[in-house]
Image (cartoon, coloured by chain):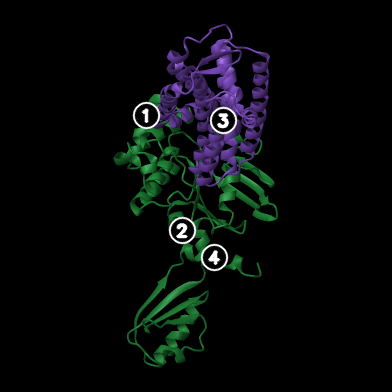
Amino acid sequence: MSSIVARSLSKSYGDVVAVNGIDLDVKAGHVFGFLGPNGAGKSTTMKLLTTLMPPTNGTIEILGLNAIKHPLEVRKRIGVVIQQPSYEPNLSVEKSLEKYGMMWNIDKKTRKQKADELIDIFDLQEIRKQKNEDLSIGQRRRVQVAREFMHEMDLLFLDEPTVGLDPSARRRLLDFLKNKAKSGLTIFYTTHVLTEAEYLCDEIAVINKGKILAVDTPDQLKSTFGQEKTIKVHLLYRHDNLADLLSNIADCSIDFNTGTDIIIQSGKSELVLSKILQILIENNIAIEDLSAMPTTLEEIFLKMVKDTNAPDN
Amino acid sequence: MHPTIRLVNRNLTISLNPGFLVWQVIFPIVYIFVAGFAYTSLIKSVPFGDSHMDYPAFIASGMIGFNIMNSTLVSGIIIWNDRRHGMFEQILVGPFTRANYILSNVYTIAIIGLISAALITLIGYPLFFESVKPNPLTIPFMVFASIVGSILFGSIASIISTRLRSSEGFNVIINTVFLFFAFVSTAFYPAQGAPEPLATAFYLNPLTYLVDIIRAGVFGTFTEFVMLEMLVLLGLAAALFVVAIKLLTKLDL
């Protein structure tokens, strides 16, 4: 069963097309990563899915409900951590959690209990009495994310929730989200940090210029789009004539800082490697080390965005 | 609990901080007791309808309207802060509609307006108790003035808060507009005896109408003119309220 189903979803502002006929399927209980560079259409898509604005075209079904016809019913069942900071400056951390629970109609006893729980989980004990206006950006972000767990939900939208968090707080949050997903919560997660998406997400969609470029699991994305391998050949000594020797071989470069590293980047890197090895042996050039580097999601993402930004596209 | 009531609860929590309450009480007290008595040596009595009254009693009753107007600044500040600190968007992705948000602001300013009016009536009572003429219309007039006045000035503050983006702009505009309302009105001095252009300007100002209605309630001076003022105030409040709602409904996220 899917928690989010969007078909031919579009949003235009005058002549500007922010989202251009995208289709989305987010399975229940999955963490769905939504990646894209600035201005790709991520935030507009989030606003459409969270019913903040109606689409120009297309349909949206959230948790089985028509989100265009029944936005309030949808909002009662979702949680949203928006991209910009949201807080009441003159309330303390504790009070803002408690008031947010009240806004969601949580009874007094439960919200007190939940607030205490979240203060522990998000490591907010030391700042629980401090006012939001006196907190650092990272602390405020932690409170903002924690606050969303004051109420129950079936689907959570997180728009770059780790911005401003230090590495340990970031890891803590990702682990917390992973556990929540295990217990059945569906998460729609946008981020610029690709290692986070790789760590957390079951499925990832890459968006650019308002269009979805690919949707798949992180591993499948790597195997489909990551055919170009990187191999590094480290030589024992520096050789001044190395550039001349390799001048006829495409897809390889010499790291001139060290002068001892040859980098091969190609879809047929093994073939390029065998040609290089032959030249090195013929010229008695000793190799100290040979390493192959796996393709990262970041490389795939950058390549996809670069391809769609090319003038032909 | 109804969503609008939950938002009113939240609005009151974030608005009624000690600083605001002190300001709401101290400022009028200074006016009533310092200006009221300091000017007594200069102003023996003030023309009021067909008779005259003490200046402290006149200013104390004017301060009720002034305080209602001042307290409705809260409405603009809530909207302004919610937009500035992301809570407007956060509320609208929660279990609320825009109508809930708008109504919660109306109820909040009406409550704060009523509390402010009651507070200043209590503080000012020793000064104007000799002139008070309680009658069956006193309380309805006071409640009418508090609610309609709150909605009117709250709508103005809301309109300003939806149209401006910089905090400097918001502060300058709101202070200028409310300063004009405060001093070009009959809250501090009567229209009778003022130079003609100034007296005319007084009656282009809704605070004058509000203060006149409050005085009519407190001192039992109901005239046809006061009834007309009530109608004008009601019409103006309704018109501005509609404009404020339209702007809030269209407010970009």
Amino acid found under the numbered disc labelled 1: Lys
Query: What secondary structure is marked by label 3?
Result: helix
- Disc 4: host chain: A
Spatial CA distance of label 4 from label 3 is: 58 Å
Which residue is tagged 2? Answer: A194
Amino acid found under the numbered disc labelled 3: Gly
Q: Residue A257 location in percent, x, y? A: 38, 81
* Marks 3/1 same chain: no
- Disc 2: host chain: A
Spatial CA distance of label 2 from label 1 is: 36 Å
Chain with colour green in the figure: A
Q: Are marks 2 and 1 in contact (CB under 8 Å)?
A: no
Question: Is residue B94 visible to us here?
Answer: no
Asked which quadrant contains residue B153, the reply is top right
Q: Nearer the viewer, residue A205 or A184?
A: A205
Q: Nearer the viewer, residue B9 or A118?
A: B9
Q: Residue at x 34, y 40 (%)?
A: A121
* Marks 2/1 same chain: yes
Q: Nearer the viewer, residue A291 or A307?
A: A307
Q: Are marks 4 and 1 in contact (CB under 8 Å)?
A: no
- Which shade is chain B? purple
Amino acid found under the numbered disc labelled 2: Leu
Q: Residues within 10 Å of mark 3 (few under 14, many from 20)?
A: many
Spatial CA distance of label 4 from label 1 is: 49 Å
Mark earlier in primary sequence (2, 4): 2
